[in-house]
Amino acid sequence: MQEISDERLIALSADSNEPAERREQALGELFDRYRPKVALWCFRVARDREWSADLAQEVFLKALRSLPGFRGDARFSTWLFTIARNHCFNAIRARAARAEDSLEFLELADTGRRIDDELELENEIRQMRELLNNKLDETERKVMTLHFGEEMTLDSVTRMLGLTNTSGAKAYIVSARRKLQTAVTRTKTKTARPEGFR
């Protein structure tokens, strides 16, 4: 079936007069043509091999369920990559929202530290969460979470959030770091002053 067009494969897979085996074969050939490209695209967006494989699988399941509604207004490849783009970006946004809520990239690791060290570290993490929530605007928080928490590239973050400024996500990283540095410096200055000078 290698030489058959996408459109013909779609028609074959939907033709109830064709034997079930031939319909399944047509569908398999259609998806096999695009599986590597969709998997690569998901990986470029997600930057995580295991997660991108799951995303690609979900894209094909979604495409399979939606295939009866495919009218051929656009090429099959365009239709499929629209599903892939929307699904991946929605998944990343959802993951970023969950990470932002919990700021899970600041969670403690099991390092075998002494309990007083752990408590001090927990306190520092709590303070950092408060700084992120109180000092940064929504876009800065999302950029920081996606870049540092989800380890997405700045280009991917820029595209995903639709940032149109010249420097993209990098500008928000610079701005967020400046705000956090200022806040940390002020906090240290306050704690370093003797009681009578506050």
Image (cartoon, helix red, strand yellow):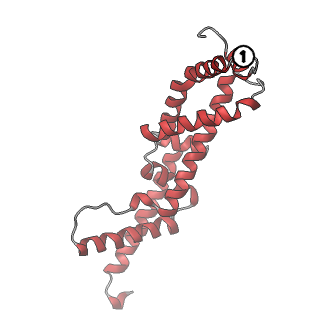
Is 58 located above or below residue 193 in the figure?
A: above
Give the residue drawn at x 54%, y 35%: 57
The outermost residue toward the top is 3
Give the residue drawn at x 78%, y 26%: 71
Disc 1 packing (10 Å; few <14; some 14–19; many ≥20): few
Q: Quarter of the image holding residue 18?
A: top right
Quadrant of image for the C terminus: bottom left
Query: Residue 141: x and y, percent?
Result: 52, 58
Q: Quarter of the image holding residue 1?
A: top right
Residue 117 appears left or right of 25: left
The outermost residue toward the bottom is 196
Give the residue drawn at x 57%, y 38%: 58
- Which of the pair 70/74 is nearer the observer? 70
Is 186 located above or below residue 44 in the figure?
A: below
- Residue topped by disc 1: 18
Q: Tell me if I can see residue 39 in this picture.
A: yes
- Which of the pair 78/123 is nearer the observer? 78
The amino acid marked with disc number 1 is Glu
Query: Residue 132: x and y, percent?
Result: 47, 64
Query: Residue 173: x and y, percent?
Result: 47, 52
Query: Residue 147: x and y, percent?
Result: 46, 48
Residue 130 appears left or right of 124: right
Q: Tell me if I can see residue 165 in this picture.
A: no
- Of helix, strand and loop, which one carries label 1? loop
Q: Quarter of the image holding residue 84?
A: top right
Give the residue drawn at x 52%, y 35%: 42
